[in-house]
Every structure is written in C-alpha cells, then in structure tokens.
Amino acid sequence: MFKLDTVAVVATISLCLPFHGLAFAQMPPKKYDKPYDGHLIEHLVPYGKAWETCNRVSIEAGGDPWPKKYQRIMGRHLYGCSIDAEIGGQKACIIVYSWSAKDPKMRSNVFRHERAHCHGWPAHHPT
C-alpha cells in the first residue's frame, strides 16, 4: 500500500502509485459493486491510454514497467487499473479508467470493475 499525504494527492494522481488490478470489462459480483468507503480518486483517460498511464504510474512509484502484453487484452486496449493507497492515515483507492465516445457504457462499467478491486475483488475475477 502506498502512502500519500493529503497535500500531495492532486499533484500525484497520475504519479507514484503501485499497481493493483487490470480491467477488461467483466462486471463484478454484487458484494464488491458498491460505493467505496475510503478516499476514492479517479483518473479518467481516453480509450487506448490506460496502459500508458498505469505503466507510467507503476514506474514512477518505483515498480516494474508493465509488460507490453498488457497493452491489449482479448484484442482490446487495457481499460483501467486500480491502486490501493493511504491518505492521511486513511485507506484510499486510485482508479485509472478509460472512456470512449463509441461506447458510452464503457466509462461506467470500467469504473465499477476497478472500484470492485478497491473493495478486494481478486485479480483473477471470481464470480
């Protein structure tokens, strides 16, 4: 878990955050599909830019670069990632997610998918 102080949150929203999960649009089970009870920080990027953003965030956090194989999953660009964090001693989650004018539901579905990872939905996506 990465710790942030409250002042640094806005400046670091796309910086220095460890990777938590990948999104490929599978909807989460109901027990994980609920409002987040900590600090939730959203970073919305155009479709096709999530891998680049998540990769940069991982590197700037001191993590490893993301393998290029994650640029596309099942023939599509990566949709998003979620990051566990701590802000001012309280739990937080940062979500990087995509939007597309061609698919208006994408934004909502990817957000819900990533928010579920913030609640502990495992990366292997059990139903």
Image (cartoon, rainbow, N blue to C red):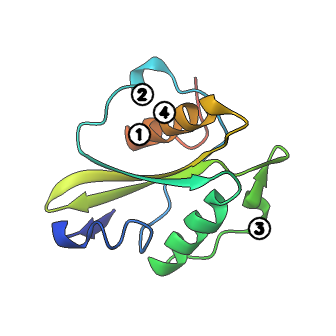
- Mark 4 or mark 3, earlier in chain: 3
- Mark 4 or mark 1, earlier in chain: 4
Nearest the camera: 16 or 97? 97
Determine whether label 4 and label 3 are within 8 Å by CB: no
Q: Closer to us: mark 2 or mark 4?
A: 4
Residue 104 image-quadrant placement: top right
Where in the figure is residue 30, as x and y percent of width and height? Answer: 45, 18
Instruction: Look at mark 4 in the image and give the residue it sits on.
Output: 112
Residue count near mark 2 (Cα–Cα under 10 Å), binned few <14, some 14–19, many ≥20: some
- Mark 2 or mark 3, earlier in chain: 2
**Distance in Å between CA atoms under marks 3 and 1:** 25 Å
The amino acid type, in three-letter code, at marker 4 is Arg
| Residue at screen point 58% across, 50% down | 80
Where in the figure is residue 59, as x and y percent of width and height? Answer: 54, 78
Q: Closer to us: mark 4 or mark 1?
A: 4
Q: Closer to us: mark 4 or mark 3?
A: 4
The amino acid type, in three-letter code, at marker 2 is Tyr
Instruction: Look at mark 1 in the image and give the residue it sits on.
Output: 120
| Residue at screen point 78% across, 54% down | 72
Determine whether label 3 and label 1 are within 8 Å by CB: no
Q: Closer to us: mark 3 or mark 1?
A: 3
Does dot 2 land on a helix, a strand or a loop? helix
Instruction: Look at mark 2 in the image and give the residue it sits on.
Output: 32
Q: Is residue 28 visible?
A: yes
**Distance in Å between CA atoms under marks 4 and 3:** 25 Å
Quarter of the image with the N terminus in it: bottom left
Does dot 1 land on a helix, a strand or a loop? loop
